[in-house]
Image (cartoon, rainbow, N blue to C red):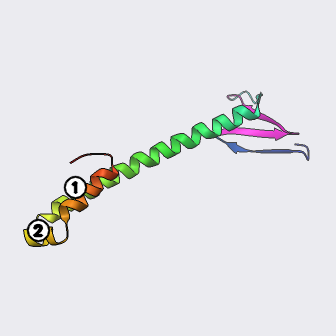
């Protein structure tokens, strides 16, 4: 590699950047195809969108589990304490965070 080259992983592909040009490796033949800056940006954005969607799904699942846990443990609190601490309101806010209604 010359001094104006660098290699690395970007968007799941092995890449080499040489004198402002981007190359993505092809399969196992050792060859490379040139990419435009637009393709590089698009690939990076697609990867980031997929990462964010996966994180969103994981957090939504965790919130659903938390709601179920609150509902389960709330059964041990007397109606007085459920009303005093607005259990129904808290559950409503948690469901609203998921975009769900009651």
Q: Please, is residue 30 above or below residue 58 in the view? A: above
Estimate the x, y position of residue 43 in percent, counting from the top left.
64, 35
The answer to whether marks 2 and 1 mark residues whose Cβ atoms lie closer than 8 Å is no
From the viewer's perspective, tell me whether residue 68 is left or right of residue 29.
left
Using the rendered view, name the quadrant where residue 77 is placed: bottom left
Dot 1 falls on a residue whose secondary structure is helix
Mark 1 lies on residue: 68
Using the rendered view, name the quadrant where residue 91 is placed: bottom left
Estimate the x, y position of residue 26 in percent, counting from the top left.
71, 28
Can residue 12 be seen by looking at this rendering? no
Mark 2 lies on residue: 76
Residue 60 vs residue 29, the one in the foreground: 60
Q: Mark 2 and mark 1: span between their CA atoms?
A: 14 Å
- The quadrant the N terminus occupies is top right
Dot 2 falls on a residue whose secondary structure is loop
Using the rendered view, name the quadrant where residue 42 is placed: top right
Residue most extreme to the left: 79
Which disc, if any, is residue 12? none
Q: Residue 25 lies in magenta, yes or no?
A: yes
Give the crowd class for mark 2: few <14, some 14-19, many >=20 residues within 10 Å.
Answer: few
From the viewer's perspective, tell me whether residue 15 is left or right of residue 83.
right
Q: What stretch is highlighted in magenta?
A: 12-27
Which residue is pictured at 9% across the width and 72% down the height? 80
Residue 70 vs residue 82, the one in the foreground: 82
Give the crowd class for mark 1: few <14, some 14-19, many >=20 residues within 10 Å.
Answer: few
């Amino acid at each position: 590699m010359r001094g104006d080259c660098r290699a690395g992983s970007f968007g799941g592909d092995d890449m080499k950047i040489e004198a402002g040009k981007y190359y993505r490796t092809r399969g196992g033949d050792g060859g490379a195809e040139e990419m435009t800056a637009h393709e590089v940006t698009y690939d990076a954005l697609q990867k980031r969108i997929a990462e964010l969607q996966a994180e969103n799904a994981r957090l939504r699942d965790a919130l659903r589990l938390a709601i179920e846990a609150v509902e389960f443990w709330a059964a041990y609190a007397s109606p007085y304490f459920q009303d005093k601490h607005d259990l129904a309101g808290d559950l409503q806010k948690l469901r609203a965070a998921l975009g769900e209604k009651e």
